[in-house]
Image (cartoon, rainbow, N blue to C red):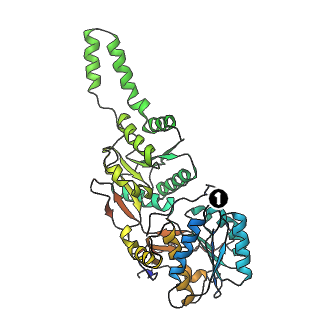
């Protein structure tokens, strides 16, 4: 069955990792029944309309209001979080006291963790704007395009094309840790060997050491280099012959055939230079990366090592309807990378209000929804499944090598709780 269209089935760049993200475990309230959630009332929008994130909050408000122009939209109760967990908690308490039946937002992972227990206690579901999957829990769905969704899609595609031994070079921060966790889980799901994952710091020295370590160059190539130096040191005909023979000996391939790289900008370019030096470059390996590479695909295509790299991201053609509508109403393109997420959340709220209320049963429709970033589905455990496209970096611009699916496989059957 086709996914339900969210009014405008047509986005800006992938939702970024927002301030406050961390790899710690998310809030996990007790399991809820499918009918959990209120059936009516206004919809609360919790966004930072003051503080350092006010510009994002204001454009999110515009995006949600754009969705609420549809017929049958409930009342919208906009509340300022101030961009802090304390402000988000206070805004949630005030919204619930006012009788609101669903919460859209808040923006960040920390704000969502502050709101989740308050909403759960009041039987109110939450469609958060963060892309940190660690906040996922029954009744709390992070709607941003997450690092984990991107990693799972591109790694699965690579495995389907014979690249089943994956390693990773990731930044030593929360974003990199989320990518690493997703890679480990996906490798296990696919039955692949456990990936070697290494994290680099902010310095180029750290980056160089990480690439050298992951490539296993010290055992693959450095040993041959040492033998060449030793042969030359003999300073005789036999030594020169031995050195020449060793120089023609190919260095063994690296212990992986796909490499997930979490770098961007200058660090990504440096990795592109280091990999051939350590004999761990294409075509021996397939480079894989995040949706953030969509911004850098043109520059990447000019680099021999980075050309041909793969990344998973929403198909930008799907968001044109939203972009055009936003431009026509507000006079400018959507300014924030999460505006499309706000629109989809608002469209879901309007749809739910017309179909029986804001319950988990309505929100977790197993056929999913067709939104600005493509098809997605909310699962009862709080996780969000997305249908992303896979792109290949090419000189003429990134090319889709695997289109975004129009529907998603059905969710796994619920496991009944054990009986005592």
Residue placed at 47% from the left, 54% from the top?
Answer: 187
Which residue lies most toward the front here?
331
Where 220 sits versus 186, above or below? Answer: above
The answer to whether residue 138 of the structure is visible from this angle is: no
Circle 1: is it few (<14), some (14-19), or many (20+) Cα within 10 Å?
few
Quarter of the image with the N terminus is: bottom left
Q: Position of residue 92 (x, y in %)?
A: 70, 74
- Per the image, the residue denoted by label 1 is 25
The answer to whether residue 15 of the structure is visible from this angle is: yes
Q: Nearer the viewer, residue 112 or 411?
A: 112
The reply, left or right, for residue 151 in relation to residue 129 is left
Where 66 sits versus 22, above or below? Answer: below
Q: Position of residue 4 (x, y in %)?
A: 45, 82
The reply, left or right, for residue 203 in relation to residue 223 is right
Q: Position of residue 119 (x, y in %)?
A: 69, 75
Residue placed at 38% from the left, 49% from the top?
Answer: 287
Residue placed at 31% from the left, 47% from the top?
Answer: 302
Q: Splitting the image into 4 quarters, where does residue 278 fall? A: top left
Secondary element at tag 1: loop
Quarter of the image with the C terminus is: bottom right
The reply, left or right, for residue 295 in relation to residue 206 is left
Where 69 sits versus 18, above or below? Answer: below
Q: Splitting the image into 4 quarters, where does residue 160 fall? A: bottom left
Count up the numbered dots.
1
């Amino acid at each position: 069955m086709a996914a339900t269209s969210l009014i405008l089935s047509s986005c800006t760049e992938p939702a970024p990792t927002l301030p406050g993200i961390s790899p710690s475990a998310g809030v996990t309230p007790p399991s809820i029944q499918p009918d959990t959630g209120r059936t009516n009332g206004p919809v609360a929008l919790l966004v930072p309309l003051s503080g350092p994130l006010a510009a994002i909050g204001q454009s999110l408000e515009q995006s949600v209001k754009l969705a609420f122009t549809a017929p049958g939209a409930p009342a919208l109760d906009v509340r300022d979080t101030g961009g802090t967990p304390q402000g988000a908690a206070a805004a949630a308490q005030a919204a619930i006291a006012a009788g609101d039946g669903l919460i859209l937002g808040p923006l960040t992972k920390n704000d969502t963790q502050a709101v989740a227990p308050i909403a759960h206690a009041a039987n109110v579901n939450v469609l958060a704007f963060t892309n940190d999957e660690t906040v996922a829990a029954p009744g709390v769905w992070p709607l941003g395009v997450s690092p984990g969704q991107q990693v799972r899609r591109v790694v699965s595609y690579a495995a389907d094309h014979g690249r089943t031994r994956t390693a990773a070079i990731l930044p030593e921060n929360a974003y990199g840790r989320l990518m690493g966790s997703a890679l480990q889980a996906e490798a296990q799901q696919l039955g692949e060997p456990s990936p070697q994952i290494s994290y680099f710091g902010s310095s180029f020295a750290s980056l160089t050491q990480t690439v050298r370590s992951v490539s296993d160059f010290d055992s693959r190539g450095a040993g041959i280099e040492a033998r060449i130096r030793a042969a030359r040191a003999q300073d005789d005909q036999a030594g020169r012959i031995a050195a020449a023979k060793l120089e023609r000996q190919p260095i063994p391939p690296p212990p992986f055939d796909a490499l997930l790289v979490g770098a961007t900008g200058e660090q990504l370019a440096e990795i592109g230079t280091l990999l051939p030096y350590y004999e761990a470059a294409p075509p021996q390996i397939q480079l894989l990366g995040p949706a953030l590479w969509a911004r850098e695909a043109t520059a990447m295509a000019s680099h021999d090592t980075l050309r041909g790299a793969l990344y998973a991201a929403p198909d930008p053609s799907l968001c044109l309807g939203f972009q055009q509508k936003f431009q026509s109403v507000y006079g400018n393109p959507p300014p924030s990378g999460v505006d499309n997420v706000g629109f989809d959340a608002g469209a879901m709220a309007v749809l739910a209000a017309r179909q029986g209320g804001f319950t988990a049963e309505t929100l977790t429709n197993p056929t999913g929804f067709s939104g600005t970033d493509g098809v997605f589905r909310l699962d009862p455990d709080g996780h969000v499944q997305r249908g992303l496209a896979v792109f290949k970096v090419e000189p003429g611009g990134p090319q889709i090598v695997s289109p975004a699916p129009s529907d998603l496989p059905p969710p796994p059957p619920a496991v009944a709780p054990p009986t005592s």
